[in-house]
Amino acid sequence: MAAGGGRYFCTAGRGMELFLAREVRARLGATEVDYITGKVFFSTDAEAGELRKLKSGERLFLLLKKGAPLAVSGNKGKMLHEIKSLVTEEPKYWLDVISIWRNFHGNEGKKDDAVQENRLPLKRKPEEETNTATKRQKTEQVSVTVSEECQTGAGERCVVPERKSNQDCWTESETSLEDPSQGSGEKPAVNNEQLSFSFRVSCRCSGAIAKILPSQEIGRAVGVALMKQCGWRADLRDPDLEIFVHLNDIHTVVGIPLFRLPLANREYIKTAGLRSTVAWAMASLAEISAGASVLDPMCGLGTILLEAAKEWPEAWYWGADISDSQLEGADMNIRTAGLMDKIELLKASVKALPLPSERFDAVISDIPFGKKFKITKDIQLLPDILQEMERVLRVGGTIVLLLSQDLHELATSITSGAENGSPNASSDGASETTAAKALNVGGNSSSSVNGVEESCPRSQQTYFGSLLPDGVYGVSLGKTDAFIHKYKKISTAGNR
């Protein structure tokens, strides 16, 4: 059932906002696209099935309120009154949004999503897993108060994408909410027999407002206001619907999670490796076309190949790795995804691939790093790795690599010839030029959007063999920051 022109926002890992903004335009035909750190806002008539196909986002919400940050003062009562007004000012609009949510879930219910709840949370590498809840307790006050409408049982936290459950993502406070209409004789302000839900409020509060009002108190205020306004029933454990409230020094956002599980949860991945959203973003830069041959020479568990093959099924994919255990995991993932006829695996070292020269149209790889992969002398192997990738790549082909900070600096030094290793391209992935990459999802991935082509300034371009740097994108992997590097092969290796 169509959403009827709903207004949405989707959370994204840091550095992924621009990929997501391009994707909602390309995939959903979205309009009024806007983004801030960690969130992309847009309008679309797309149906639920199409919205579920978003690959670069974390969690999708129907937007109830977006505005300026609340004014902070010493008067807590006044501040709480303003917070309550977030849900009482426009009751008709709220009910319209609830109707859209209800249309989406009229034929679904919780069971379809709950089947997937036991799937492993998506992580980059097991050794990099961090206790996000502990970290968040130190940096911002977070709590969850149940109020009557909440359809999303999975917890709210998408900027750090490795986490899935409430326990991982929030400091949850089981604050009881007494129904204000009981004992007082009050009736709900809205006749809401047809929209009677159980709900909870998930509140995240940071910045100046968090120093005055804890999230628990804010969540309670919103919950009581909703019970008065709509007559809904609070249920912390198994609500029908969740109200998400995020207050900080930049904005005020209120929304309803559209699906129980994050979009980033991939049902076709049995054992997670690299974050699926980042893997998809890397594949989207590789300019994969029908009939193309794509290689991941350090494929690990095969996440990049899976994301690419699902999105661009008319291409052919090969994965290589030196580790038997990684290849076994990749094979299991490929079988789970039903892509045995699309992805071929082989055991080989990235430094000496048993493959012919100029065989592939694209090479995409996550160069291992992190606690498990201590980069000391091995950092000197990067030139050899680049050289071998360059060898097997056809002229006009694309290389896309995910690199750590150290490898990013070395790769920039190698390909730019800079004496001090300073990057020539944007290293934070935030420039609008870099963001103009094309994401022609479902067809060919491209490097231009609306005629805008992104590349490094010509005056700063130098070569590593025949590789031309073609963009750098900074992304977050939770605790670790990384950089996506893109290169184009402009001539046969050894020639300019």
Image: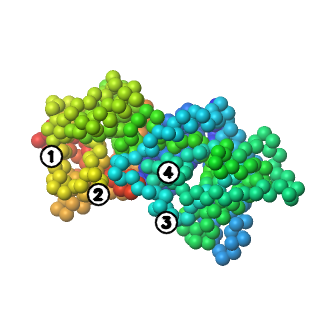
Q: Which residue is mark 4?
A: 158
Q: CA distance from mark 2 to mark 1?
A: 19 Å
Q: Nearer the viewer, mark 4 or mark 1?
A: 4
Q: Position of residue 86 (x, y in %)?
A: 69, 58
Q: CA distance from mark 4 to mark 1?
A: 36 Å
Q: Position of residue 39 (x, y in %)?
A: 51, 52
Q: Which residue is mark 1?
A: 384
Residue in view at x 35 percent, y 56 percent: 481
Q: Position of residue 172 (x, y in %)?
A: 58, 57
Q: Nearer the viewer, mark 3 or mark 2?
A: 3
**Quadrant in the picture for residue 103:** top right
- Would you say 117 lies left or right of 378 here? right
Of the numbered discs 3 and 1, the one sitting upstream in the chain is 3
Residue type marked 4: Cys
Proximity of marks 2 and 1: CB atoms separated by less than 8 Å: no
Q: Nearer the viewer, mark 3 or mark 4?
A: 3
Q: Nearer the viewer, mark 3 or mark 1?
A: 3
Of the numbered discs 2 and 1, the one sitting upstream in the chain is 1
Residue in the foreground of this view, choosing between 330 and 18: 330
Of the numbered discs 4 and 2, the one sitting upstream in the chain is 4
**Quadrant in the picture for residue 480:** bottom left
Q: Position of residue 375 (x, y in %)?
A: 22, 55
- Quadrant containing the N terminus in the rendered view: top right
Q: Would you call the spot at circle 1 few (<14 residues within 10 Å), some (14-19), or many (20 or more)?
A: few
Dot 1 falls on a residue whose secondary structure is helix
Of the numbered discs 4 and 1, the one sitting upstream in the chain is 4
Q: CA distance from mark 3 to mark 2?
A: 24 Å
- Would you say 238 lies left or right of 443 here? right
Q: Is residue 481 visible?
A: yes
- Would you say 435 lies left or right of 298 here? right
Q: Which residue is mark 2?
A: 405
